[in-house]
Amino acid sequence: MFPSLSFLVCLGLCLGQVIQAQNGPLPKPSLQALPSSLVPLGKPVTIRCQGPPGVDLYRLEKLRSGKYEDKAVLVIPAMDESSAGHYRCSYQNGTRWSLPSDQLELVATGVYDKPILSARPSPAVSTGGDVTLQCESRFGFDQFALLKKGDTGPYKKPERWYLAHFPIITVTAAHSGTYQCYSFSSTTPYLWSAPSDPLELVVTGTSVIPSQLPTEAPSSITGTTLHSHQYYTKGNLVRICLGALILMLLVGILAEDWHSRKKPLLHRIRAVHRPLPPVPQTQKAHSCQDGGQPDDHNHECHH
């Protein structure tokens, strides 16, 4: 029994997926700093590289330093200036390496004195209005960062002088919350000042109470789950395709077995209806005694 066209197409697709999965690069891992990538001097931080289950080897490296460690977790018990910088990681399964993770910027805060954060014209603003947050430092820094509590990362803005303005146009209830700012130099982008004193921005004229807005950063479990889904999507596709291929092979084997069992039965049924061959006639010469010869006309034996 010859395989059908759909079977051949499925086989080709499955083989293509398997070959691509085996030869292509492994998906990139995730890299995160816990509890935060903004770390005050002297405080602990943990850098964690997360890949799919069953990884043979992790490699965690600090960029531009030439240093790396073959581990998934790096614990820094007390943050210092030398630990700040860009990090990335990758992993190995067999002889294949994964794509590198997205870069992680680990920042040491508290290196310089804190700036001053203020709101112009006022920290209380009505819905639809405009407000400008102003970050001012007594040093001549050319970089400033504004962070809202609950956001995943700061908003950075370069400035030539000691002062930075962060305008918020058409304020909504989502802008309510607690803000802080940092100042630093572009020559040392991973060494920031201490955070400014918190500034509470209140949006009036809405039914949303600012204290009810989320104040916690999104859980790191969410990011891990999304990366795990990426790892498993391609693998599940290959598994499903292989499962369908095996199922079709089993169906083909069963059909072939049924077909082979059916053929002998048909042969046996047809054989019953065939006529028997004629029985060969025995010569009467064998009934003559003493080796007599039969007569050609009356078939009698003569002695």
Image (tube, rainbow, N blue to C red):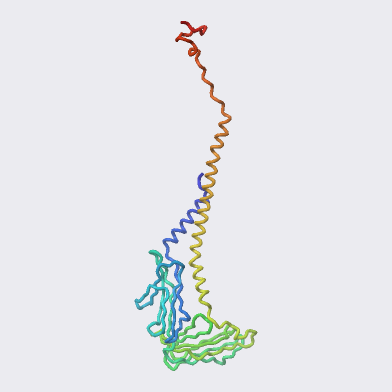
Name the outermost residue toward the top: 303
Q: In percent of the image, x 52 and y 51: which residue is there?
A: 248
The answer to which of 95 and 153 lies nearer the viewer is 95
Instruction: State whether residue 180 is above or below residue 12.
Output: below
Q: Please name whichever residue, 241 or 133, is drawn nearer the observer in this view of the structure.
A: 241
Coordinates of residue 181 in the picture (x, y in percent): 49, 88
- Please tell me whether residue 230 is drawn above or below residue 196 in the rendered image: above
- In the image, taking residue 187 as reference, residue 286 lies left or right, namely right
> From what the image shows, is residue 96 above or below residue 82?
above
- In this view, the residue farthest toward the left is 66
Outermost residue toward the front in this view = 290
Question: Which of the 4 image quarters holds residue 271?
Answer: top right
Residue 303 position in % (x across, y down): 46, 5
Observer-nearest of 142 and 1: 1
Residue toward you, 8 or 223: 223
Residue at (47%, 10%) from the top-left corner? 289
Q: How many labels were placed on the picture?
A: 0
Image quadrant of residue 137? bottom left
Q: Which residue is located at x 51 percent, y 87 percent?
A: 166
Where does residue 7 sit, x and y in percent of width and height? 51, 51
